[in-house]
Image (spheres, rainbow, N blue to C red):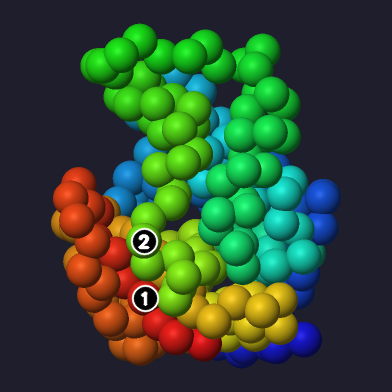
Amino acid sequence: MLSVTAEPTTATIRRYRETDLAAVYDICVRTADAGQDARGKYRSDDLMGDLFAGPYVFLEPEVAFVLDEGGRAVGYIVGTPDTAAFARAYRERWIPRLADRYRVPPQPPVSPDEQMLALHYWPERLLWPGLAEYPAHLHIDLLPAFQGAGYGRALMASFCDAVTEAGAAGVHVTVVADNVPAIGFYRRLGFEPLAVDDPGPVVYLGRKL
């Protein structure tokens, strides 16, 4: 198990456990607005977790890791070694699991909630031609007090080791274009911009494993 120490706290990285779910959701919403707190932005504070954390720990728990400080998760990394398989599993297993929670949004979606739910009901958005070279993808979030201390780099190392062992040849991320700190973080870890037709409001970055 990889561990990192920083003052004034000592935190360790370990595999995700089901008892971490509430903490992971809390971290997710607190960092979901381009790295800033998104609580109160949507009708439910669980919406961000239901899109960007919950499906990963449900479908791919073997490559999910948390940063543990004093027995509670204060950061996490989740993802998949096989984005195409994940998109299929999301439609077959995750969407039905939340069917009683969220209605299919109108087209075109208008409100912020509808725009997010449009992503939920369209997991095929994760599919793009570069998956042959960069089949894995991830989401990483840490509470502000634990950022900038090397924990993000250590979480990335744990995840990349896990998806490499699972057979992934490369990993990619998508980042909102105006989230400059996140883009800088990935670039420092060797991720390079990827050419994608019509990427929308995000940039694609990838790294070979």
Secondary-structure class at tag 1: strand
* Res. 129 mark: 2
Q: Foreground residue, 136 or 140?
A: 136
User: Callout 2: few (<14), some (14-19), or many (20+) C-alpha neighbours within 10 Å?
Assistant: few
Q: Tell me the quarter of the image containing the N terminus.
A: bottom right
Q: Is residue 106 above or below residue 127?
A: above
With 4 as the anchor, is 30 left or right in this view?
A: left
Marked residue nearer the N-terminal end (1 or 2) = 2
Residue 179 at least partly seen? no
With 195 as the anchor, is 186 left or right in this view?
A: right
User: Callout 1: few (<14), some (14-19), or many (20+) C-alpha neighbours within 10 Å?
Assistant: many
* Res. 206 mark: 1
Q: Foreground residue, 145 or 19?
A: 19
On the image, the x and y values in percent for residue 70 come to: 74, 68
On the image, the x and y values in percent for residue 71 come to: 78, 64
- The residue lying at 45 percent from left, 65 percent from top is 131
The reply to whether discs 1 and 2 touch (Cβ–Cβ < 8 Å) is: no
- The residue lying at 51 percent from left, 63 percent from top is 138
- The residue lying at 26 percent from left, 16 percent from top is 108
How many marks the image carries: the answer is 2
**What's the CA distance linking mark 1 and mark 2?**
13 Å
What residue type is disc 2 on?
Pro
On the image, the x and y values in percent for residue 83 come to: 55, 58
On the image, the x and y values in percent for residue 5 come to: 61, 89
With 56 as the anchor, is 71 left or right in this view?
A: right
